[in-house]
Image (cartoon, rainbow, N blue to C red):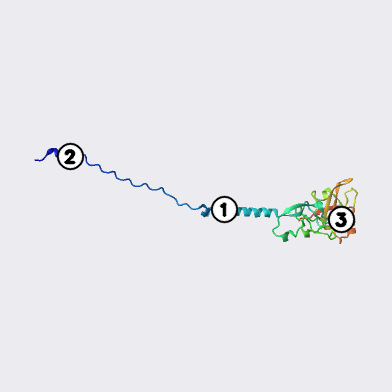
Amino acid sequence: MFDVSLLTRGSSATPPRQADAPHPPASPPATRQRRSRWRDPRLWLGIALVVGSVVVGAKVMAAADDTVGVWQLVHDVPFGAEVDATDVRVTQVHFGEPAVAGQYLTSDVPIAPGEHATRDLQAGELLGLASVSSARSPLGRQLPLGVAAAAAPADLRSGDHVEVWAVAGGTDGTPRARGLPTMVLPDVVVLSVGSSLSGVSSDRQVLVGLADDVDVGGVLRQVTGAQVVLVRLAG
């Protein structure tokens, strides 16, 4: 007969324990392939920019220091007037080409005595070689004129070009023959403008330059006993 106890014992028996499944091995940490810093093109680009900036800056500084001292006029100098050390000052100028610098009077050479302006020179102008000449001034004679305050521009100054007119009838109150105004000199340079003349408060002395070919006697005949009027020329 069938043994029930065996069946019971067999059904209650604990099933055999299975062995634990093995764990998969841990993944190794990811490693990033590193490029050498010296092989990084960005590093070399940065170095090139720094070096380029230093070189350019050095060239700019060197160019800024490469200047030449040149004589510069401190005020207007009329044509024919003498130019000396009191008329100029030193200014540093950078010239792109040495040949250009050679066209100006440099401050390392003093202005020689007897130099005259070969044309009207303006304040602030650099003194060029052709601007002055040691030859005899083309305005070899200087004529002083007594001019009433109302007979010339109030701001008349040296370097201005004027017409000289003579108007019959003086300013001393004595009657004189009336006549038409006469142009005495068509274009002369004002060399200096003085203050009021002593004893004649309304007049001032104006010194004008005359060329050698001017008939001084004729000029004096026309202005003597007449009122002198100066008309400034534009330009």
User: Is 59 on the left-hand or right-hand side of 26?
Assistant: right
User: Where does label 3 land, which residue?
Assistant: 142
C-alpha separation, residue under disc 2 versus residue under disc 1: 84 Å
Q: Earlier in the sequence, mark 3 or mark 2?
A: 2
Residue linked to disc 2? 11
What is the distance, in whole Å, between disc 3 and disc 1 at their CAs? 71 Å
Residue at 55% from the left image edge and 54% from the top image edge: 44
Q: Quadrant of residue 110?
A: bottom right
**N-terminal-most mark, 2 or 1:** 2
Q: Which residue is mark 1?
A: 47
Q: Is residue 209 visible?
A: yes
Q: Amino acid at mark 1?
A: Ile
- Indicate the secondary structure of the residue bearing disc 3: strand
Residue 182 visible within the image: no
* Crowding at mark 3 (Cα within 10 Å: few <14, some 14-19, many 20+): some
The crowding category of the residue bearing disc 1, from other C-alpha atoms within 10 Å (few below 14, some 14 to 19, many at least 20), is few
Name the element at disc 2.
helix
Residue 52: image location, x then y, percent: 60, 54
User: Where does the image place residue 116, in percent across and percent down from the top left?
Assistant: 82, 57
* Foreground label between 3 and 1: 1
Indicate the amino acid at tag 3. Gln
Q: Quadrant of the C terminus?
A: bottom right
Residue 145 x, y percent position in the rendering? 87, 52
Pick whichever, 160 or 152, lies toward us. Answer: 160
60 left or right of 223?
left
Residue 12 in percent (x, y) is at 18, 38
Q: Select label 2 or label 1 by which is in front.
A: 2
